[in-house]
Image (cartoon, rainbow, N blue to C red):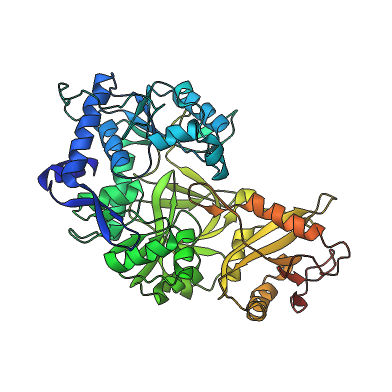
């Protein structure tokens, strides 16, 4: 796919490739196909001049856009591997991660270097932090250089010949996913697994040449551009994004669930097909997207280790009445099975080769409990998110989908320590804008009753904290939020000082809560 893209860039140099937007939503061309080809050639020559060859590692701290894509194309052409740096991980974690990857050079734009330097106090407010990049390896600036930045990567490279593209397989990208400073964990994709993942996206979405696509990830940019479709980077502001969608009329839109919720709150409208992933997407959210004009609304189940794995359209998800979260049929080439503990295991050509420092393994342990229902994958919760109440194991993911009733944007079940080794089960639900609380109480009563022995001790109406690059619901932070609200109830009466944020299911701790005694403050 990357080879196809390289040829397409040269075949149609005048075509718009990467699009931006003005505050009014008007389309602005950020780069043509020819611009991308030229940037990739310059970065290839500059990296080659620095001795980057097959097997080398290049750290990348460049914001998504034309330069980031050109950097990755250059690294791929040289047969090297790119280690993606996440400024949201924290400096200590990044030092540990990069010590494991050992980059030969770190490519960073001026913004990333500012986050690591003079703008560190400002960036910390946005939960962004980078160590001094020079601690990680030699640094070169990609894009405009500001005072205090490292030298520009592609200075005086016109005399350097661009080497022929490397053929064959090998490591292509390193993406850090989890772990601690003592034991960081990184996914290693090879050139072949990366190509297989992008081919799956292209087959799933079928982008048409000449019609714009909206999205900002590598797995959106490459298949779309290779098919001849320009890609528009989503505006950060929901209001501007709404205008952008109206003016652009994309054939396909890729947004995360938090982006979709913010856009819907602004009254945004859709057209064509809408795809969402990176965080759970409820049937309620997909239904709202369709009501807002989308022809189709798809939830994509994907992991860093295997992208994408399965997909489900709104109609199928809304029609599913079983317990758990239906994420769809495994995509072509993806094999799925469950282990002895009920954990979902996946394999296929797009699966990561290995974790850095470990041996290759064809099966990806997802960490999700699941069952296969007529060939479809139904998630039943994260293995590590189990709540232990009265010696009973409760898996939140088995019940959370049922709590996504009309008016509820997000719902999590979390455990709060009860002080004696037991836990209290709390449902934290995030209402949509303008949701009527009496209507929410009525809508939740049925799902709560059907939870049986897994009914929560309390239902808290509150915004659910998000974290990470994908803005996934943060269970640990949500559990702390629930604990603070429960601690405010000294009498156990349910009269919390939560400023109207509590739907309280009363019930003694030795029995499940009574769903008929739900009070709204």
Residue at 39 percent of width and 49 percent of height: 307
| Outermost residue to the front | 147
Taking the spot 75% from the left edge, 79% from the top edge, the residue there is 516
Indicate the position of residue 214 as horizontal and vertical percent values. Answer: 32, 58
Nearer to me, 431 or 164: 431
Q: Residue 266: where, in percent of width, then height?
A: 46, 69
Q: Quadrant of the N terminus?
A: top left
Name above or below for residue 150 compared with residue 514.
above
Residue 213 location, quadrant: bottom left
Q: Is residue 70 left or right of residue 290?
A: left
Quarter of image, res 112: top left
Residue 151 visible within the image: yes
Do we see residue 392 in this rendering?
A: no
Residue 173 screen position, x and y as percent: 37, 35
Residue 193 in the image: above or below residue 113: below
Q: Name the residue furthest right.
A: 491
Label count reads 0
Left or right for 389, reference 427: right
Q: Position of residue 502 (x, y in %)?
A: 73, 69
Q: Residue at x 21, y 49 (%)?
A: 226
Camera-side residue: 338 or 162? 162
Q: Residue at x 57, y 36 (%)?
A: 179
Camera-side residue: 87 or 76?
87
């Amino acid at each position: 796919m990357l080879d196809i893209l390289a040829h397409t860039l040269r075949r149609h140099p005048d075509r718009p490739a990467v699009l931006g937007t003005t505050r009014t939503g008007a389309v602005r061309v950020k780069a043509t196909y020819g611009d991308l080809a030229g940037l990739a050639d310059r970065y290839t020559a500059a990296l080659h001049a620095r001795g980057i060859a097959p097997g080398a590692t290049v750290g990348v701290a460049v914001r998504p856009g034309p330069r980031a894509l050109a950097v990755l194309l250059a690294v791929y052409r040289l047969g090297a591997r790119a280690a993606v740096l996440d400024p949201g991980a924290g400096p200590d974690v990044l030092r540990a991660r990069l010590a494991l990857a050992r980059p030969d050079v770190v490519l960073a734009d001026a913004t990333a270097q500012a986050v690591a330097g003079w703008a560190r106090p400002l960036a910390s407010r946005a939960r962004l932090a980078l160590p001094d990049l020079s601690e990680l390896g030699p640094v070169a600036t990609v894009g405009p250089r500001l005072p205090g930045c490292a030298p520009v990567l592609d200075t005086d490279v016109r005399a350097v010949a661009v080497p022929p593209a490397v053929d064959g397989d090998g490591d292509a990208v390193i993406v850090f996913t989890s772990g601690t400073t003592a034991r960081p964990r990184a996914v290693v994709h090879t050139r072949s697994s990366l190509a297989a993942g992008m081919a799956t996206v292209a087959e799933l979405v079928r982008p048409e040449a000449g019609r714009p696509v909206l999205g900002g990830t590598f797995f959106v940019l490459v298949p779309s551009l290779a098919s001849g479709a320009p890609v528009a980077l989503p505006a950060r502001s929901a209001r501007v994004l709404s205008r952008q969608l109206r003016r652009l009329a994309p054939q396909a839109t890729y947004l995360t669930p938090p982006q979709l919720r913010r856009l819907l709150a602004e009254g945004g409208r859709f057209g064509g097909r809408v795809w969402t992933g990176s965080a759970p997407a409820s049937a309620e959210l997909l239904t709202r997207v369709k009501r807002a004009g989308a022809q189709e609304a798809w939830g994509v189940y994907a992991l860093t280790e295997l992208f994408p794995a399965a997909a489900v359209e709104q109609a199928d998800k809304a029609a599913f009445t079983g317990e758990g979260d239906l994420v769809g049929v495994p995509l072509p080439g993806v094999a799925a099975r469950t282990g002895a503990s009920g954990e979902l295991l996946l394999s296929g050509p797009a699966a990561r080769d290995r974790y850095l420092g470990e041996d290759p393994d064809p099966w990806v342990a997802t960490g999700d409990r699941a069952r296969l229902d007529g060939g479809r994958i139904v998630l039943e919760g994260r293995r590590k998110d189990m709540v232990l109440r009265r010696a009973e194991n409760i898996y939140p993911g088995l019940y959370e989908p049922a709590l996504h009733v009309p008016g509820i944007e997000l719902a999590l079940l979390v455990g709060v320590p009860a002080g004696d080794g037991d836990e209290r089960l709390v449902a934290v639900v995030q209402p949509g804008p303008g949701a009527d609380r009496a209507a929410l109480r009525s809508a939740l009563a049925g799902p709560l009753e059907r939870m049986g022995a897994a009914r929560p001790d309390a239902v808290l109406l509150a915004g659910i904290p998000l974290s990470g690059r994908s803005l996934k619901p943060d269970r640990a932070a949500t559990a702390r939020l629930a604990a603070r609200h429960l601690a405010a109830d000294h009498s156990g009466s349910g009269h919390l000082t939560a400023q109207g944020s509590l739907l309280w299911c009363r019930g003694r701790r030795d029995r499940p809560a009574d769903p008929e005694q739900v009070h709204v403050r």
